[in-house]
Image (tube, rainbow, N blue to C red):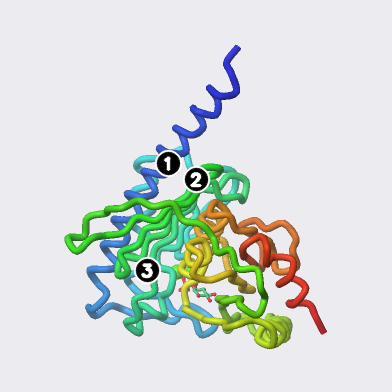
Amino acid sequence: FFSNLFYKRIMMEQLDLYLSIAIKAAKMSGDILKRNFKKQFIIEDKGNRDIVTSIDKASEELLYRYFQKVTPEINFYGEETLGNIEGISWVVDPLDGTKNYVHRIPYFGVSIALCEDLLPIVGVVYFPLLGELYMATKGNGAFLVKNNEKSIFVKKQRILCSSTERIDHCFLATGFPHSKSQLLGDYMSELENVLKNVSAVRRFGSAAYDLCQVAKGTFDGFWEHGLESWDMAAGALIAEEAGCTVSKSDGAPWNIKSPTIFVSNQQLHTKLLDIFSSK
Ligand code: IPD
Ligand code: CA
Ligand code: CA
């Protein structure tokens, strides 16, 4: 009785509603990160050469409370408190780039995704010191909104991945699996192969930032081993909606539980996969 178009519209309206909730949450969390950036905060050891600050915790607490209040029907899964990732779930990183934050480097942000059966359908990443908020919903493109000098969000613009085709022009980002040393062997041989072929490789210290920069076309691609769902979920959707191909580092289909991620523009994807595994 109802047309497909009707269902599509309902679906889009639903996604837009969740997108606006995620944006509001990201701005509130971003304010906490920005306000405390230059202040003293508590830093604790969290595991194998990993740390957590009182600001990571405050940001997650705010996100948890907010999502419980406005979407009690949706699960919550955050880096600092975990929770339930199954079914429909908010998957959040309350502060991506904690070590940058501690060393007062402005590449850090909050990453929020709504996931359905381990695949992101809404993604928002906000870098409060850079004044950049990235967003996407499944099937509807990726966008960037910037803050002006008065901290008001202006100029929503669509973002697209790069169109670089030549490997020797390729500008890539990566992350080191420094706290998962069992992954270093494979990673180092990939890195060696990549360094012998591409124009340059950068390491920024925030996977969410790397993914958004591939979405925006600054980098032609990004790969990392050993990331967690909260690091990648939102950024991967934003990159995909900007036209990138997202897979595991062997080219197999990716989801938020995948142990690796490899994102690049479509033209470079297969060529780079060959380089990762070349001898
Ligand atoms: C880290 C950052 C970093 C990546 C690490 C992540 P955190 O997240 O995204 O770029 O290399 O693997 O753990 O700990 O700052 O939220
Ligand atoms: Ca992270
Ligand atoms: Ca984090």
Residue 220 drawn above or below residue 200: above
Circle 1/circle 3 CB separation < 8 Å: no
In the drawing, what numbered circle is on residue 2? none
Instruction: Tell me what residue is drawn at x 22 percent, y 78 percent.
Output: 39
Few, some or many residues within 10 Å of mark 1 (<14, 14–19, 20+): many
- Nearest the eye: 49 or 239: 239
- Nearest the eye: 45 or 138: 138
Q: Is residue 51 left or right of residue 162?
A: left
Q: CA distance from mark 1 to mark 2?
A: 9 Å
Q: Earlier in the sequence, mark 3 or mark 2?
A: 3
Residue extending farthest to the right is: 279
Q: Earlier in the sequence, mark 1 or mark 3?
A: 1
Q: Position of residue 159 (x, y in %)?
A: 46, 56
**Mark 2, residue position:** 137
Q: Can residue 75 be seen by looking at this rendering? A: no
Secondary structure of residue under mark 1: helix
Few, some or many residues within 10 Å of mark 2 (<14, 14–19, 20+): many
Q: Quadrant of residue 28?
A: bottom left
Depth check, mark 1 against mark 2: the one in front is 2
